[in-house]
Image (cartoon, rainbow, N blue to C red):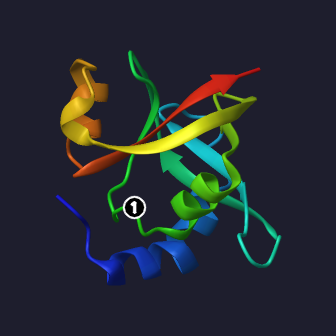
């Protein structure tokens, strides 16, 4: 299920600011560190992400047109901070959620979105 864009706008200006304070400490929450494609500005976006057999998976609940996803794809990666650890995310790509073979909560959550951003985490 894709979430409406108006919800994304509220989250961007209100919810993300609050979640950004603690998301990097509490898995499955994480913070994606990315650089703006045209501005070159550094951004931090709270997301939910899971380690899966395909790599680190972040469900794209608002679709692949989200700015943080576009920024990661354009730059060829960024960083993910989860559980207090900050690691490089390399080789990001968008895949259909049906390709994710994770089970349990990770599987249910990643398949709740139509597509997922997958990448490899490196120390």
Give x and y (percent) for residue 6. 34, 84
Instruction: Give left or right: position of 99 versus 87.
Output: left
Reply above or below: 27 against 76. Answer: above
Reply above or below: 24 against 61. Answer: above
Instruction: Give left or right: position of 89 versus 27.
Output: right
Q: Quadrant of the C terminus?
A: top right
In the image shown, does 46 or 26 lie closer to the viewer?
46
In the image shown, does 34 or 21 lie closer to the viewer?
34
The number of numbered badges drawn on the structure is 1
For image coordinates 65% across by 35% down, the residue present is 89
For image coordinates 62% across by 53% down, the residue present is 72
For image coordinates 73% across by 29% down, the residue present is 87
Task: Identify the residue position indicated by label 1 in the image.
Answer: 64
In the image shown, does 19 or 50 lie closer to the viewer?
50
Say if residue 44 shows up in the picture: yes
Instruction: Give left or right: position of 109 versus 22.
Output: left
As helix, strand or loop, the secondary structure at mark 1 comes to: loop
Choose top left, top right, bottom left or bottom right for residue 58.
Answer: top left
Q: Quadrant of the N terminus?
A: bottom left
Say if residue 22 shows up in the picture: no
Give x and y (percent) for residue 114. 22, 52
Callout 1 environment at 10 Å: few (<14), some (14 to 19), or many (20+)? some
Give x and y (percent) for residue 61. 32, 57
Reply above or below: 112 against 41. Answer: above
């Amino acid at each position: 299920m894709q979430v409406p864009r108006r919800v994304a706008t509220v989250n961007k200006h209100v919810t993300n600011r609050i979640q950004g304070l603690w998301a990097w400490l509490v898995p499955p929450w994480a913070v994606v560190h990315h650089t703006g494609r045209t501005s070159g500005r550094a951004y931090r976006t709270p997301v939910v992400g899971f380690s899966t057999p395909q790599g680190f998976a972040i469900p794209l609940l608002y679709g692949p047109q989200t700015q943080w996803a576009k920024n990661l794809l354009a730059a060829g990666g960024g960083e993910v901070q989860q559980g207090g650890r900050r690691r490089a995310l390399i080789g990001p790509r968008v895949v259909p959620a049906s390709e994710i073979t994770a089970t349990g909560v990770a599987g249910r959550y990643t398949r709740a979105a139509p597509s997922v951003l997958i990448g490899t985490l490196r120390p």
